[in-house]
C-alpha cells in the first residue's frame, strides 16, 4: 500500500489545497474498469452474494474479466474467529485468508479462485487508516471518516480492479442500507461514482417485497422505504431487484419504479427459485445483463462465441440438476452444528454438484454426535449409504464420531473424513486395529498416552503449525496406484486448502501402515500426512483428507473425493446394480492389492 502522499500526488492535488481526495493507484486508467455495487435494503439475508455472483457469472460468460469483492461491516479482521453457528462456515481462500461463506458462492459460481483482495472488513480498513496515521502519512491533517476512510475504500477497489485486470468489479456491501456499520461504504461508492464519471458505476438495490399471509397479496411499502433510505444517502439506484417469495406482480413493480425513479425495464422480480444455479439464466432471460452492459457502456467488450459455449455447458448442468434422477441414496453427516446447514455450506454444495452429475436424489441426514452415546453409533447410522465426518474443533462429540468411523470401517460403509474426520479415522484405526486402545489427540487430552494426533515441537516451525493454524492452499503429493490416485486421475500432485493445527505424529506412521492404513497423500517434503485410505480390496470406499476438499467443489468440476463417495453411496443403496450403470469413472475397480508405501521421513 503506497503512502498517502503518493496517493495525493497521483490524484494531482494535496489535501491542503482542495476538498477532493481521490486516491488512485499508479497506472490506474479511468474508464478501463467499471463497477457494479450491490446494496441490500429492507432486511439482511436477501442473497446479495448469490445475486451478485450470478450477475458476475453472466458477464464472465460473455468473456469479460470480473472481480467480486465483499465488504463486511464488522470489525473483525477476518472470519477466522467467527462462530460458524452464528455466521455460517469459515471459507478459506487459497492464500490462506479466512472469509465468510459468500466467498464460497463467488468461487463456485465464477469457477475462479479469489484472494484476500476480494474481501474486506471495516476492521481491516480502520486498521490501515490508523497505521497510516501513526506513520504520519496524513501530512498533519485531522483524519476523518470522509475523506480518509472512504478514500481507503476507493483505493482498495481501484487497486483490486488493476491487480485482477477486471473489466467489471462487483462490490457487495454487507448488511442493510441504514445500518450504522456500512454507512461509510455507501458514501465511498457514491464518491467513486462521482469521480469515475458517467457510465462507470452501476448501483443495484436489492429489496424485498413482503407478502403477509393474512393479506394474501404483495405489498411494496417496505421496499419503497428501503429504497428511499438509499436515496437519502445520495445513491440513486440504476437497477432495482425485488426479492420475493413469488413472482412480483406488475402493479407492485410499477409502484417501486415510480417511487425510486427507476424505469420499469430496470426493475426485476428476483423471486425464490428451486436452485440458485438457475438464477443466471433467469437473469439473462429478463434482460438484466444487457441493461448492465448498457449502463456501463461495455457492449463492445462481449465475446459472443465464448458466451454461447459457456451458456451451453451451464445449461446442461442445470438441466441435470433440476431434472429427474435415476438413483436415490442417503448420506449421513456428523457434526456439532448439525442443526445449522450454513455451518457446512460447502459440503452441502459439493454434494449437490455430485448428486447432479451422478443423477442421484441424495438425502442428507444430519447426525449430531453430541447427543448420543458412542454405543448408539450403529443405530444412528442405520439406513445411511455413506458417512461424512466433517471438520471441527474441540472434544465434544468426538467419541461418538470415532464410533461412527468404526462402524463404517467394519461394515464397509463408504466413508469420507474431512480434517477432524481424517484425524478421527486415524485414532479409530490406532485403537481398534493397531491395538493402541488409549490412542487420541492432544487437542482433546494433553496427557493422552498415545497421541497419534498431536502438535509436534519440530513441526511447529513448519508452515505455521503450532500456535497458529496451518491455512490455505498447499501441494499434496499423491501415491500412485491408490484410491486417491484413481480419484485424482493419476495426478502426482494436487493442490488443496487446509485449516488445521494438529496432524498425525510421524512416529506412529510405520505402525499404522504395517496394519494396513495407507497414507496416499503427503506433504512434498515433510512427513505430514494429508490423505489416508484403506485399500479397495478391504473396503469399498474409505478415505480421509487433512485438507478441506469441499472448498474446491465447483458445479462444472465436482470434487473427486465427493464424487467417489457419492458413487459408492449409490452402489451401497443399489447393491445389484453393475458399476457401468452408476459410473465406472468414480467407482474404483475391485482392488488390485496395493503394497503400503515406504513412509517418507518417518
Ligand atoms: N481441530 C483439528 C485441528 O485443528 C481439525 C481442524 C478442522 O477440522 N478444521 O487440527
Image (spheres, rainbow, N blue to C red):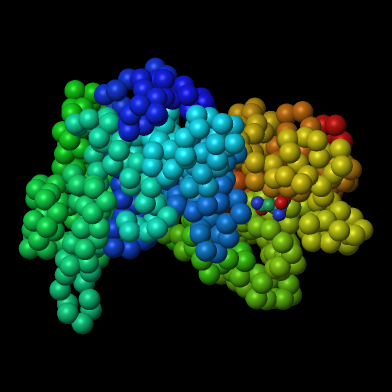
Q: Residue at x 31, y 35 (%)?
A: 192
Q: Picture quarter containing residue 421? A: bottom right
Q: Is residue 360 left or right of residue 29?
A: right
Q: Quadrant of residue 28?
A: top left
Residue located farthest toward the bottom when viewing the structure as drawn: 214
For the view shown, which residue lies furthest in the top direction? 27
Query: x and y percent of residue 519 in the render?
Result: 75, 41
Residue 450 vs 308, above or below: the answer is below
Location of the C terminus (image quadrant):
top right
Residue drawn at the location 62% of the way across and 73% of the way down: 380
Q: Position of residue 56 (x, y in %)?
A: 32, 39
| Number of callouts | 0
Q: Is residue 444 visible?
A: yes
Q: Is residue 429 left or right of residue 126?
A: right
Please give the name of the residue rendered at 40% of the width and 58% of the height, measured from the top-left corner: 180
Q: Is residue 538 above or below residue 36?
A: below
- Residue 397 location, quadrant: bottom right
- Residue 251 lies, in percent from the top left, at 7, 63
Q: Is 411 in front, or is 106?
A: 106
* Residue drawn at point x = 73 percent, y = 47 percent: 501
Locate residue 567 relative to residue 515 in the image: left or right. left
Q: Position of residue 77 (x, y in %)?
A: 56, 47
Between 14 and 533, the residue placed more toward the observer is 14
- Is any atom of residue 416 visible in this view? no
Amino acid at each position: 500500500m503506497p503512502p498517502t502522499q503518493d496517493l495525493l500526488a497521483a490524484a494531482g492535488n494535496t489535501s491542503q489545497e482542495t476538498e477532493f481526495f481521490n486516491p488512485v493507484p499508479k497506472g490506474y486508467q479511468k474508464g478501463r474498469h467499471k463497477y457494479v455495487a450491490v446494496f441490500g435494503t429492507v432486511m439482511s439475508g436477501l442473497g446479495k452474494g448469490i445475486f451478485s455472483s450470478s450477475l458476475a457469472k453472466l458477464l464472465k460468460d460473455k468473456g469479460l474479466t470480473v472481480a467480486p469483492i465483499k465488504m463486511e461491516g464488522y470489525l473483525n479482521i477476518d472470519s477466522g474467529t467467527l462462530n460458524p453457528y452464528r455466521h455460517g462456515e469459515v471459507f478459506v481462500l487459497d492464500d490462506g485468508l479466512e472469509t465468510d461463506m459468500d466467498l464460497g458462492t463467488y468461487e463456485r459460481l465464477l469457477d475462479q479462485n479469489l484472494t484476500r483482495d476480494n474481501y474486506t472488513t471495516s476492521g481491516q480498513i480502520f486498521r490501515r487508516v490508523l497505521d497510516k496515521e501513526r506513520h504520519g502519512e496524513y501530512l498533519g491533517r485531522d483524519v476523518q471518516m470522509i475523506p480518509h476512510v472512504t478514500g481507503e475504500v476507493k483505493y482498495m477497489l481501484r487497486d483490486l480492479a488493476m491487480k485482477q485486470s477486471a473489466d467489471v468489479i462487483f462490490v457487495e456491501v454487507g448488511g442493510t442500507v441504514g445500518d450504522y456499520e456500512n454507512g461509510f461504504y455507501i458514501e465511498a461508492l457514491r464518491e467513486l461514482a462521482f469521480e469515475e464519471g458517467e457510465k462507470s458505476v452501476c448501483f443495484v438495490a436489492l429489496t424485498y417485497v413482503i407478502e403477509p399471509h393474512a393479506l394474501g397479496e404483495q405489498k411494496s411499502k417496505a421496499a419503497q422505504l428501503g429504497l428511499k433510505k438509499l436515496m437519502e444517502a445520495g445513491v440513486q439506484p440504476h437497477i432495482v431487484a425485488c426479492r420475493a417469495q413469488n413472482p412480483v406482480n406488475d402493479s407492485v413493480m410499477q409502484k417501486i419504479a415510480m417511487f425510486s425513479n427507476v424505469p420499469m425495464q430496470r426493475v426485476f422480480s428476483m423471486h425464490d427459485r428451486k436452485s440458485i444455479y438457475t438464477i443466471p439464466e433467469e437473469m439473462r432471460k429478463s434482460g438484466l445483463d444487457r441493461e448492465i452492459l448498457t449502463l456501463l457502456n461495455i457492449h463492445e467488450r462481449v465475446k459472443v462465441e465464448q458466451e454461447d459455449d459457456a451458456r451451453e455447458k451451464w445449461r446442461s448442468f442445470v438441466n441435470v440438476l433440476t431434472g429427474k434422477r435415476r438413483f436415490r441414496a442417503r448420506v449421513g453427516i456428523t457434526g456439532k452444528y448439525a442443526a445449522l446447514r450454513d455451518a457446512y455450506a460447502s459440503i452441502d454444495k459439493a454434494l449437490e454438484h455430485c448428486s447432479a452429475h451422478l443423477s442421484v436424489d441424495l438425502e442428507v441426514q444430519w447426525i449430531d454426535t453430541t447427543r448420543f452415546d458412542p454405543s448408539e453409533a450403529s443405530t444412528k447410522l442405520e439406513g445411511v449409504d455413506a458417512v461424512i465426518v466433517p471438520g471441527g474443533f474441540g472434544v465434544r462429540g468426538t467419541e461418538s464420531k470415532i464410533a461412527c468411523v468404526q462402524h463404517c470401517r467394519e461394515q464397509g460403509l463408504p466413508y469420507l473424513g474431512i480434517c477432524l474426520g481424517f484425524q478421527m479415522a486415524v485414532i479409530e484405526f490406532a485403537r481398534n486395529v493397531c491395538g493402541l486402545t488409549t490412542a487420541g489427540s492432544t487437542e482433546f487430552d494433553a496427557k493422552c498416552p498415545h497421541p497419534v494426533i498431536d502438535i509436534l515441537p519440530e513441526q511447529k516451525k513448519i508452515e505455521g503449525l503450532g500456535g497458529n493454524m496451518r491455512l490455505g492452499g498447499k501441494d499434496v503429493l499423491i501415491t500412485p496406484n491408490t484410491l486417491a490416485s484413481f480419484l485424482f486421475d493419476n495426478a502426482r500432485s494436487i493442490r488443496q486448502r487446509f485449516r488445521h493445527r494438529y496432524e498425525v505424529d510421524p512416529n506412529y506412521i510405520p505402525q499404522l501402515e504395517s496394519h494396513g492404513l495407507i497414507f496416499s497423500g503427503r506433504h512434498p517434503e515433510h512427513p505430514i500426512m494429508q490423505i489416508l485410505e484403506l485399500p479397495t480390496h478391504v473396503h469399498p470406499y474409505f478415505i480421509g483428507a487433512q485438507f478441506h476438499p469441499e472448498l474446491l467443489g465447483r458445479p462444472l468440476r465436482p470434487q473427486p473425493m465427493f464424487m467417489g463417495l457419492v458413487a459408492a453411496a449409490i452402489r451401497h443403496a443399489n447393491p445389484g446394480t453393475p458399476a457401468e450403470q452408476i459410473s465406472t469413472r468414480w467407482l474404483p475397480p475391485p482392488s488390485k492389492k496395493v503394497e503400503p508405501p515406504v513412509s517418507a521421513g518417518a
